[in-house]
């Protein structure tokens, strides 16, 4: 009887360890350069983690993302329509392709994987496309 | 000599009238670039909004084109946001933007939501995957441009929206809004 109780307790402990060890996908997130600051994304910027472009791009790890978004500032300057001279591509990528929307505006924009016809395990990405560096914060939630 | 003052007055009247016509026409064109007449064909409940910090519960469905539902999302004490999503699931937004300063504005008659892609790592050329977006009243079509400036595809605007999944292959470097006369009203980048 004592052996059975010990076995059940050991099994319960193992289940707790496995449950805690799993990533919490519902609240998982990625931010660049941090979750509360802005970084400069230019042609030589990289997160050095195997993004689609070896430079001029920041990207997350592979995950099942709910959406990604960027908050872009007026750096180095905006016209009266809040447009900068630097263009970025924001969206997702996998091993076959990189896909997203282009923007030059100092705005906050969001996109979901399904909106660019992608699914499965993806990287959230923001890539420099043209012009000077952009000051922005990129993030994704899963 | 007595007819000279009459001629001068007549000439002045013609000049004033012509000037007024030009100003009025330009004013109308200017207004067209900053107005969105389509107020939506129905109010719909917005579900799973992608901006969690922005309390958007309802939107106006402006149009359904190319299997895409296109929305104007009014907010209290703020400029409207614009969103887009699958036509098969009205109210489910896949992308949203809340343009700073509002949309449309003079110099920004198009709010482009087109999706671009690349399958090459070595060059930063992007091709179109899908074309979609919103346009001010005066915009008759949106032209997507090759890197050399030539027009790759021209998409008509109706009811302040444009959309198509029939896209050309090859690199795209920007777009331009054109009016009914084919005159360019704005270009990006």
Image (tube, helix red, strand yellow):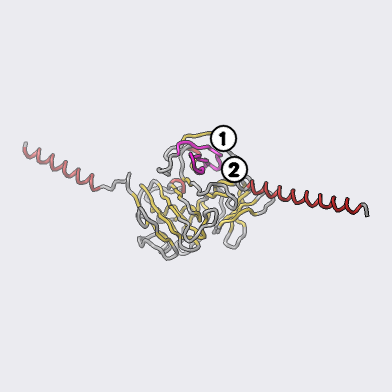
Residue B24, visible in the rendered structure = yes
Residue neighbourhood size for the residue with mark 2, other residues' Cα within 10 Å, grouped as few (<14), some (14–19), many (≥20)? some
* Vertical comparison of B60 with A132: above or below: above
Q: Position of residue A30 (x, y in %)?
A: 35, 52
Q: Residue at x 81, y 52 (%)?
A: B12
Residue B176: assigned label: none
Name the subunit of mark 2: B
Q: Position of residue B122 (x, y in %)?
A: 46, 64
Q: Residue at x 48, y 63 (%)?
A: A132
In the image, A25 versus B164, the foreground residue is A25
* Vertical comparison of A30 with A44: above or below: above
Q: Position of residue A54 (x, y in %)?
A: 40, 63
Where is mark 2, residue-wise? B36
Q: Residue at x 32, y 45 (%)?
A: A27
> Farthest right residue?
B1
Residue B82, visible in the rendered structure = no
| Main secondary structure of the magenta stretch | strand
Q: Which residues are magenta?
A: B56-81
Where is mark 1, residue-wise? B41
- Marks 2 and 1, how far apart in space? 14 Å
Respond whether the residues carrying marks 2 and 1 are from the same subunit.
yes
Q: Position of residue B84 (x, y in %)?
A: 50, 43
SS type, badge 1: loop
Is A12 a magenta residue? no
Q: Residue at x 54, y 57 (%)?
A: A79
| Mark 2 / mark 1, whichever is N-terminal | 2
SS type, badge 2: loop
Name the subunit of mark 1: B
Quarter of the rendering occupied by the N terminus of chain A: top left
> Badges 2 and 1: C-beta atoms under 8 Å apart?
no
């Amino acid at each position: 009887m004592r052996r059975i109780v010990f076995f059940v307790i050991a099994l319960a402990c193992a289940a707790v360890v496995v449950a805690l060890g799993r990533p919490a996908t519902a609240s998982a997130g990625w931010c660049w350069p941090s979750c509360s600051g802005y970084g400069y994304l230019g042609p030589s910027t990289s997160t050095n983690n195997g993004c689609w472009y070896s430079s001029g791009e920041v990207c997350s790890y592979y995950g099942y993302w709910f959406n990604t978004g960027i908050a872009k500032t007026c750096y180095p300057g905006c016209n009266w329509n809040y447009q900068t001279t630097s263009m970025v591509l924001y969206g997702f990528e996998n091993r076959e392709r990189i896909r997203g929307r282009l923007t030059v505006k100092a705005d906050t924009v969001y996109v979901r994987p399904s909106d660019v016809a992608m699914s499965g395990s993806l990287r959230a990405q923001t890539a420099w496309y043209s012009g000077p560096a952009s000051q922005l914060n990129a993030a994704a939630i899963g | 000599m007595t007819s000279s003052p009459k001629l001068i007055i007549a000439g002045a009247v013609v000049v004033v009238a012509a000037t007024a016509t030009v100003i009025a026409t330009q004013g109308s064109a200017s207004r067209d670039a900053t107005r969105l007449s389509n107020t939506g064909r129905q109010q719909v409940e917005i579900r799973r909004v992608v901006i969690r910090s922005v309390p958007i519960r309802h939107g106006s469905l402006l149009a359904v084109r190319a299997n895409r539902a296109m929305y104007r999302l009014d907010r209290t004490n703020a400029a409207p946001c614009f969103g887009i999503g699958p036509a098969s699931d009205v109210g489910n937004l896949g992308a949203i933007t809340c343009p700073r300063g509002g949309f449309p504005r003079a110099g920004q008659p198009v709010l482009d939501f087109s999706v671009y892609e690349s399958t090459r790592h070595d060059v930063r050329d992007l091709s179109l995957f899908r074309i979609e977006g919103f346009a001010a009243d005066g915009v008759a079509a949106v032209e997507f441009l090759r890197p050399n400036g030539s027009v790759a595809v021209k998409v008509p605007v109706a009811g302040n929206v444009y959309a198509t999944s029939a896209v050309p292959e090859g690199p795209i470097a920007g777009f331009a809004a054109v009016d009914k006369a084919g005159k360019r009203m704005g270009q990006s980048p």
